[in-house]
Amino acid sequence: MPAEPASQDNGSRPGRIPPHSHEAEQGVIGCILLDAERALDFCIERKLSAESFHIPAHRSIYDVLVSMSSAGEPVDVLTVTQKLRDTGQLERVGGAVELDRIIDATPTAAHAEYYISLVREKHILRSVIDWARAAERQCIGATDSADTVLSDIEQRLLGITDTEHGRMVPWSESVKLAMEHIEKVFLTKTGIYGLSTGFRNLDKVLMGMKRAEMIIIAARPSMGKTSLAMNIAENVALGKLSQDGSHAVGIFSLEMSREALLVRMLCSHARVSTHKISGGYVSANEAHGPLTQAASALSKVSIHLDDTGGLDVLELRARARRMKQKYKIELVVVDYLQLLHSKEHSRQGLQVETAAISGHLKAMAKELDLPVLALSQLSRAPDNRDKSGTPRLSDLRDSGAIEQDADVVCMLRRPCRYPEDELAGDATLAIVDIVKQRNGPTGEVHLNFEEEFTRFADRAGGGDNDLGAMEMEEPVELP
C-alpha cells in the first residue's frame, strides 16, 4: 500500500497518527458504489460499522450507504450523491467530485474483501489503543480496588473481541442447549434430528442431515449423483418423512442450466421419461396430466435455484448468505465442488485451490448453521483398481482436504455399470457407501434407481449386514 496521508489525530497524542488506511477505506466505499449487494454482504459478515472508518467523510458516506441499502433503495453514485445532498452532508464529504474520485480510484469491486479486512484490522488496532489509554487513565485516577479496576479493564478488552469475533457461548448455556437437542431427538420418536433426506434407509444411518455439517456425495460421471441430490432437495422442500413440514432449499447448479434441471425435476416427479419426451415417443395426452400435477406440486415449494456457472467460492457464500436472509433456506446443495473457483488461490495449483474451496464450504455450513450437500467427482482410480469400481476416500478428486473437511462422505455407485461385478445383473441397484461419518456408523445403504425417470427410491432391506439389521430403539420417555 502507498504511504498513508497525514490526518488529524481526533484527540490522540500530538504528532501521532492513529492506524488507518485511507486507500482501503476509499476502496471499501468504491466497491459498494460499484457492486453494493456483494460488497455490503462482506461488510456485514466482517461486522464493519461507520466507526470502523477513521476518515470522518468516509464514516458519513458509509452510514448513508448502509441506511439506503437497509431501506431497499438503489445504491449507486447518483442516488448516493442525491441522498447526501438531501441530508445536507454532500459538501461536508467533499461534494459529488469526491464520490467520482473514489470510484475512479477503485478499478474493480473484486477486491472488496481485501479492502474490508484492512479497514477492520486498522479499526481493531485503534480500539486497542483507545482501550490502553482508558486503562492508563483509570489506573492513574483509581478510587476502586485494583481487582475491580482490573476486572473492568479486562471486560472492556473482551468487548473488543466480542464485537470482532462474535460472542462465545458460556459453557453452562452450551450444556443446556445440548440437552434440549437430545430431548428433541427423544420426542421426535424417529431418531432423526436433522433434515430428513426423504429416504428411510439413508435416514436410519445418517439420522438426517444435521446443521453446520458438510455432506459430500461423490461418484464417477453418470452414476446419478445429481439425480440423488435433486431428489433429496425435492424431498426436503416437500417435507417428505419430515415431522415439521417443508423446508426452504437453496441450489447452486454450476453444471446444468436452470431449464435443464427443472425439466429433469418435473419429469422425475411425474415419472415421465425425459428422453422419450425429447424424442417425441410420448404423446402429449399421456404426459400432460402427470407433468401438470408435478408442476403444481413443485411450484408451491420453496426451492431457490442459482445456475450461474464458474462461481467464485466467496461469491457463492455471499449468495447463500442472501438466500438465508431472504428465504430462510435450511439446506444448500452445490453441484458440483470441482466447478467452483477460488481467485485467491487459483495461482497456487489445483490442490491448494480445491482445499480452499472445501474449507470455505465447511465454513459456510457453520456460519449459516445449516447442512451443505456438495457433490464431488472421483478420480479414475476406482475404474482401474478392481472389477466392481468400488471407490475409496482417497479417490476424491484434486485434494485430500475434502475428506478432512467433510462431516459425511457418501460414495455412490451402480453395479450394473460394471459388467464383471457380481451384482451387475440388478439394473436398479444403487449403492450409497457411507465411508465417513463423524457422528455415526459407516456402511452401505441400498436404494433403487429408476434411470428412465432419474429417480431414487427406498429398497427393501436396503443396507449391509450391520446397517440393514439396525432397528430404531423405542423412544425414552422423559419425565
Image (tube, grey):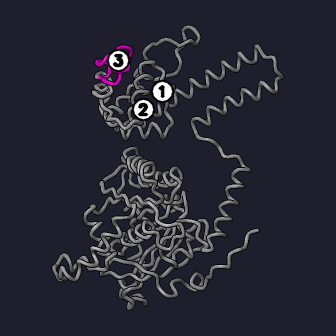
Give residue 381's position: percent from left, percent from top: 41, 72
Q: Is residue 209 magenta?
A: no
> The N terminus lies in which quarter of the figure?
top left
- N-terminal-most mark, 3 or 1: 1
Q: How much space separates mark 3 and mark 1, taking CA atoms?
A: 17 Å
According to the image, label 2 marks what residue?
66
User: Depth-wise, is mark 2 or mark 1 nearer the camera?
Assistant: 2
User: Does 258 appear above or below 65?
Assistant: below
x and y, in percent, of residue 44 in the image? 47, 38
Q: Which residue is mark 1?
A: 50
- Counting residues from the start of the chain, the first of labels 2 and 1 encountered is 1
Element assignment for label 3: loop
Location of residue 158 (image quadrant): top right
Question: Residue drawn at (49%, 64%), measured in percent from left and top?
Answer: 215
Asked whether residue 348 is in view, the answer is no
Q: Residues within 10 Å of mark 1 (few under 14, many from 20)?
A: some
Q: Examine the rendered structure and indicate whether residue 118 appears above or below residue 389.
A: above
Checking the image for residue 112, the label placed there is: none
| Mark 2 touches mark 1? (CB < 8 Å) | yes
Residue 185 vertical placement versus 254 (above, below): below
Look at mark 3 in the image and give the residue it sits on: 90
Q: Which residue occupies 28% across, 79% down?
A: 272
Q: Amino acid at mark 2?
A: Val
Query: Which residue extends farthest right?
Result: 145
Q: In this image, 22 relative to 148: left or right?
A: left
Q: Is residue 118 left or right of residue 455?
A: right
Q: Main secondary structure of the magenta part?
A: helix
Q: x, y (%) of residue 262?
A: 29, 66
Please state the extent of the stretch shown in magenta in the rendering.
81-99
Total marks shown come to: 3
Q: Position of residue 145 (x, y in %)?
A: 83, 22
